[in-house]
Image: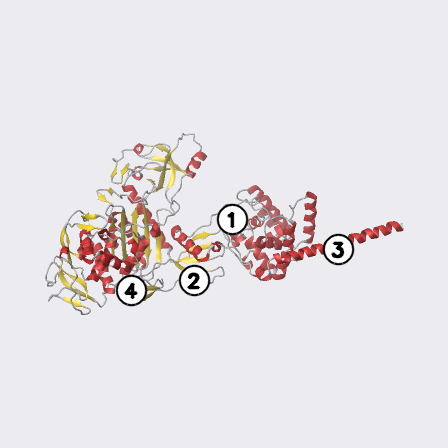
C-alpha cells in the first residue's frame, strides 16, 4: 500500500512539474510573441477603412471608391435591439469576461484535438476585433495565441463600448459590406435606426458565416440563423415571447441594394477620383476622405440632358443604321432566353434594348426586360435608312421597312406619350461650363454615356476649333490697332502657306464680300477676312498673342490655316479662353475641387480665392492668381462683337433665350469634322463640341451642313436656358477707356446722327476715327493708325 501511495505521489509530482514546465514554456512563448503585436498607441488610434466619397458642391454623392462599403457609426447611435442581437449571437458574456472565454477556449481545444483540426475557435467579440483589425485569418495555434494576447491588450487599453463599436463598424457581413450600418443599407436600403427586430436579428446572424447565412443568396439558411438569434435573445430575456413570435414569423425581406448615388455625374466624379489618387496615393480608397467638387448637380443634369438630346437629334437627322443584332425567335421562345439575350446588350439611361416580337403595318411590339411595349408610327417614322453622312434613304411606308422580327433595337420613352425607336449615337460630343470670374467648373460632360465610353472628351479630346478661334485673332487685331469699324476685304485671296503651299481659302457660304467692317465680318464668320487680318499682323505676332488666353505654343499652327482654326484644343481650354472676354480680361485657371474633408470631418483643403492681378505675368503658374491677359477695353469690345454674332450673325437662333448679355461664336472646321459653339452670359461660360472620335465629315441633313450653328449651338442653348436662371444680366457698362462714335455701317467712317445707315460703335480710346460727328468719350487719347497693308482692301 505504501508502495502504491509513493508511486502515486511521484506521478502527481511529475505531472505537476510537467504542467509547470509546460506553463512556463507557454508563458515564455507567449512573451516572445508580444513584440509582434501592435502597441498601445496603435490600438488606441485604430482607423477604420472607409471609401473615398465624391460630392457635388450641393452635397450630392456622385462617386464612391473603395473595396469596402462602410458607414461608421458611434455606439450611442446603434439601436439597443441590434446590440442585444449581436451579444446573443456572438458573445452574451461580453460585458463580464476579460476578453476571452476560458470555458469556450477549453471546449474548442478539446474539439479540435479530437478532430485533429483547427475548426473550432470560441472567439469572443474582443478576439474577433483583434483578428479583424490586426491579424491574418489563418487558423493556426500560433495565430490563436496572438489573438488571445491581443484581446487582453485591447481590454486593457479600451473600454467595452469602444471595443463593441469597433466590432460593429469592422465586421464583414457579405456583399462588400463592412460594418452593420453599411449592411443595413446593402440588405434593407435604410439606416440602422429603421430596422425592425427581425431585420436586426438577421444582420446579427451574419458574422458567423456571411455567405452561408446570406439572406439574399441563401434565404433559407438565413432564416434559420435569424430564428436561432431570436431564440437566444428570448432565453437571455432581451425580448419576450410575443416579440419572439412576431419576429420569427416575419418573412425574409432582404434584397441587395446597390449604393445609390444622389446625382449622376460620372465624368466629373472620375476627375475627382483621379485628383485624390494623385494627391494621396493608393491609401485614398480606405482613408475616408470626402471631396467636394465645384459641380452643381442641377447644372450637371441640365448639361448631360442637353448633350444627350443634341447628339440623338443629330443622329436621327442622318437616318437609322439598323438593328444592333438579330436573333431567331418564335411564339414559344421562353422569356428567360429573351432576358439572357437582352442582358448582353448595354442600356444607356432611357435607351433600353428590346427584341422585336411582333410587327404590324404601322407599329411593332418589343420585349423589354419584364415587359412588352408597342412603338407606333409616330415613334418610328423618322427612321429613314442611313446611307452616308450626307445622304439618307426614302421615307419608310410601313413598320416592316424599318424592323424585322427578332431585331434587337433600342427603345426610349416618347416625348409626349408612348415609346419611340432609338439608337445609340455614333457621333460624340462634350460640354464644359465654367464661372469666368472664379474658374469653378459648374458642369462637365465628356460624352454621351460614361459607361459606354470613359474617354472624357471635355478634357482629353484635342480637336480643331474652327471659327471658334476667330475671336482671339480679332482680339489680337484690336490690340494691333484695328477697330470693329475697320474695313477688310472679303474677296478671294491666294496666300503662300508654309504647310500648304499656295492656298486659296473660301468663306463658309462660298460667297465673296467687298470691304467689310470687322464687326460684321466676325458675326458672319468670314474666313477671308480672318486670313487677311492674320497676314497683316503676321503669324508670329498672332501666335504669341494667342498664348495670352492659355493656349500652349505647340497647339497653335505656324501657317495661315490658323485663321480658320487649325489648332488643337480641348473644350475646357476653349471655355477657359472665352472666360477672358467674359470676366473683363483676366486669365483664370479652371478648377473642380472645392474642398476636402477627412474622416474626422476636418476640412484639410479649401480652394483658394482668385486674386485678379494687373501686373502679373501670365506664366507665373499660380492657380490662385489671375493675371491680366488683355485690357478691359479689349475685352469689352470683344464682348460687344460676340454679342453681334447672336443679334445678326451665325448664332441668331440663340435670340430665343431673350438675354441681351449673351455672346459667343460658332465654330466649324473647313472639312466639317468639328462643330463648336462657345459663349457666355450672366456669369457663366459654356463651350460645346460635336464630332466623331475618329474625325470624319459630320455631313449634311435637311439641306444644311452640320455646322457649329446646327450641331453645337442647339446644345448650348438647351443648357444655357437652365444655367442662366441662376445669374442676373451681366453689367454692360463700358470701362473708362472706351469711346462711342456714330459711324456709317458701310464705310465705318463717322457720320451724322441723322444718317439712316449709322450706328454707335465702340472704340478703344485712341483708335476711334477722326471726325466732327457725334462722339462720346470716357477718356481722351490720340489717334492710333492701324499697322496694315494694302492687301486688306
Front disc: 3 or 2: 3
Q: Marks 3 and 2, Cα distance to the nearest angstrom?
A: 60 Å
| Label 1 SS | loop
The answer to which of marks 2 and 4 sits earlier in the sequence is 2
Q: How is the image coloured?
A: secondary structure
Check disc 2: other Cα within 10 Å, few if <14, some if 14-19, many if 20+.
Answer: few
Q: Marks 4 and 3, Cα distance to the nearest angstrom?
A: 85 Å
Residue holding disc 4? 628
Q: Marks 1 and 3, Cα distance to the nearest angstrom?
A: 47 Å
Residue 60 seen in the current view = no
The answer to which of marks 1 and 3 sits earlier in the sequence is 3
Q: Are marks 4 and 3 in contact (CB under 8 Å)?
A: no
The answer to which of marks 4 and 3 sits earlier in the sequence is 3
The answer to which of marks 3 and 2 sits earlier in the sequence is 3
Residue holding disc 2? 605
| Label 3 SS | helix
In the displayed orientation, state which residue is furthest to the right: 1
Residue 549 shown left or right of residue 742 in the figure: right
Q: Marks 1 and 4, Cα distance to the nearest angstrom?
A: 51 Å
Residue holding disc 1? 176
Q: Quadrant of the C terminus?
A: bottom left
Q: Are marks 2 and 4 in contact (CB under 8 Å)?
A: no
The percent position of residue 524, horizontal first and vertical second, equals: 19, 52
Residue holding disc 3? 20
Residue 635 seen in the current view = yes
Amino acid at each position: 500500500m505504501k508502495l502504491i501511495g509513493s508511486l502515486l505521489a511521484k506521478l502527481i509530482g511529475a505531472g505537476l512539474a510537467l504542467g509547470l514546465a509546460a506553463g512556463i514554456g507557454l508563458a515564455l512563448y507567449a512573451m516572445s510573441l508580444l513584440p509582434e503585436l501592435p502597441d498601445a498607441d496603435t490600438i488606441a488610434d485604430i482607423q477604420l477603412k472607409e471609401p473615398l466619397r465624391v460630392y457635388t458642391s450641393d452635397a450630392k454623392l456622385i462617386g464612391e471608391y473603395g473595396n469596402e462599403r462602410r458607414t461608421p457609426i458611434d455606439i450611442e447611435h446603434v439601436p439597443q435591439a441590434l446590440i442585444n442581437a449581436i451579444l446573443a449571437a456572438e458573445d452574451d458574456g461580453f460585458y463580464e469576461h476579460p476578453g476571452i472565454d476560458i470555458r469556450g477556449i477549453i471546449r474548442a481545444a478539446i474539439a479540435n484535438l479530437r478532430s485533429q483540426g483547427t475548426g473550432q475557435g470560441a472567439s469572443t467579440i474582443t478576439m474577433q476585433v483583434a483578428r479583424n483589425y490586426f491579424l491574418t485569418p489563418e487558423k493556426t495555434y500560433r495565430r490563436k495565441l496572438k489573438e488571445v494576447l491581443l484581446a487582453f491588450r485591447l481590454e486593457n487599453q479600451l473600454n467595452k463600448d469602444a471595443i463593441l463599436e469597433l466590432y460593429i463598424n469592422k465586421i464583414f457581413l457579405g456583399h462588400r459590406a463592412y460594418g452593420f450600418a453599411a449592411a443595413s443599407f446593402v440588405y434593407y436600403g435604410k439606416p440602422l435606426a429603421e430596422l425592425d427586430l427581425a431585420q436586426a436579428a438577421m444582420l446579427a446572424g451574419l458574422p458567423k458565416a456571411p455567405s452561408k447565412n446570406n439572406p439574399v443568396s441563401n434565404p433559407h439558411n438565413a432564416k434559420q440563423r435569424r430564428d436561432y438569434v431570436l431564440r437566444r435573445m428570448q432565453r437571455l430575456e432581451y425580448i419576450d415571447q410575443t416579440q419572439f413570435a412576431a419576429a420569427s414569423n416575419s418573412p425574409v425581406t432582404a434584397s441587395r441594394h446597390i449604393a445609390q448615388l444622389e446625382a449622376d455625374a460620372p465624368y466629373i466624379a472620375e476627375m475627382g477620383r483621379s485628383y485624390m489618387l494623385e494627391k494621396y496615393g493608393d491609401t485614398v480608397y480606405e482613408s475616408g476622405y470626402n471631396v467636394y467638387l465645384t459641380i452643381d448637380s442641377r447644372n450637371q443634369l441640365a448639361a448631360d440632358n442637353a448633350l444627350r438630346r443634341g447628339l440623338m437629334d443629330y443622329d436621327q437627322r442622318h437616318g437609322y443604321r439598323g438593328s444592333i443584332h438579330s436573333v431567331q425567335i418564335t411564339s414559344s421562345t421562353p422569356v428567360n432566353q429573351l432576358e439572357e439575350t437582352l442582358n448582353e446588350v448595354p442600356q444607356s439611361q432611357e435607351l433600353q434594348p428590346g427584341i422585336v416580337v411582333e410587327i404590324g403595318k404601322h407599329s411593332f411590339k418589343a420585349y423589354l426586360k419584364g415587359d412588352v411595349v408597342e412603338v407606333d408610327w409616330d415613334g418610328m417614322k423618322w427612321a429613314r435608312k442611313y446611307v452616308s453622312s450626307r445622304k439618307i434613304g426614302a421615307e419608310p411606308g410601313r413598320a416592316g421597312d424599318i424592323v424585322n422580327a427578332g431585331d434587337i433595337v433600342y427603345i426610349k420613352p416618347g416625348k409626349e406619350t408612348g415609346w419611340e425607336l432609338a439608337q445609340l449615337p455614333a457621333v460624340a460630343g462634350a460640354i464644359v461650363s465654367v464661372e469666368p470670374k472664379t474658374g469653378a467648373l459648374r458642369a462637365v460632360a465628356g460624352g454621351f454615356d460614361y459607361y459606354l465610353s470613359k474617354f472624357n472628351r471635355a478634357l482629353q479630346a484635342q480637336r480643331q476649333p474652327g471659327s471658334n478661334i476667330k475671336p482671339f485673332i480679332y482680339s489680337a487685331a484690336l490690340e494691333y490697332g484695328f477697330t470693329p469699324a475697320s474695313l477688310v476685304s472679303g474677296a478671294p485671296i491666294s496666300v503662300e502657306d508654309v504647310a500648304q503651299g499656295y492656298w486659296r481659302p473660301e468663306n463658309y457660304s462660298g460667297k465673296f464680300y467687298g470691304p467689310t467692317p470687322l464687326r460684321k465680318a466676325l458675326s458672319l464668320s468670314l474666313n477671308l477676312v480672318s486670313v487677311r487680318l492674320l497676314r497683316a499682323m503676321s503669324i508670329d505676332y498672332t501666335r504669341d498673342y494667342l498664348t495670352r488666353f492659355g493656349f500652349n505654343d505647340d497647339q497653335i499652327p505656324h501657317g495661315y490655316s490658323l485663321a480658320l482654326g487649325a489648332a488643337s484644343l480641348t473644350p475646357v481650354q476653349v471655355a477657359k479662353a472665352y472666360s477672358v472676354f467674359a470676366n473683363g480680361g483676366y486669365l483664370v485657371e479652371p478648377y473642380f475641387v472645392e474642398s476636402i474633408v477627412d474622416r474626422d470631418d476636418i476640412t484639410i483643403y479649401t480652394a483658394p480665392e482668385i486674386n485678379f492681378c494687373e501686373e502679373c505675368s501670365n506664366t507665373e503658374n499660380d492657380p490662385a492668381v489671375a493675371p491680366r491677359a488683355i485690357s478691359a477695353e479689349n475685352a469689352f469690345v470683344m464682348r460687344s462683337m460676340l454679342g453681334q454674332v447672336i443679334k445678326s450673325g451665325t448664332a441668331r437662333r440663340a435670340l430665343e433665350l431673350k438675354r441681351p448679355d449673351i455672346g459667343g461664336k460658332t465654330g466649324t472646321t473647313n472639312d466639317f469634322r468639328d462643330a463648336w459653339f462657345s459663349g457666355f452670359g450672366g456669369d457663366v461660360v459654356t463651350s460645346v463640341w460635336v464630332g466623331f472620335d475618329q474625325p470624319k465629315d459630320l455631313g449634311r441633313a435637311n439641306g444644311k451642313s452640320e455646322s457649329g450653328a446646327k450641331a453645337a449651338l442647339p446644345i448650348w442653348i438647351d443648357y444655357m436656358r437652365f444655367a442662366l436662371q441662376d445669374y442676373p444680366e451681366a453689367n454692360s457698362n463700358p470701362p473708362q477707356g472706351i469711346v462711342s462714335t456714330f459711324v456709317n455701317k458701310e464705310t465705318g467712317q463717322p457720320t451724322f446722327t441723322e444718317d439712316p445707315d449709322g450706328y454707335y460703335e465702340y472704340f478703344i480710346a485712341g483708335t476711334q476715327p477722326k471726325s466732327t460727328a457725334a462722339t462720346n468719350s470716357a477718356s481722351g487719347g490720340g489717334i492710333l493708325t492701324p499697322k496694315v497693308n494694302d492687301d486688306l482692301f
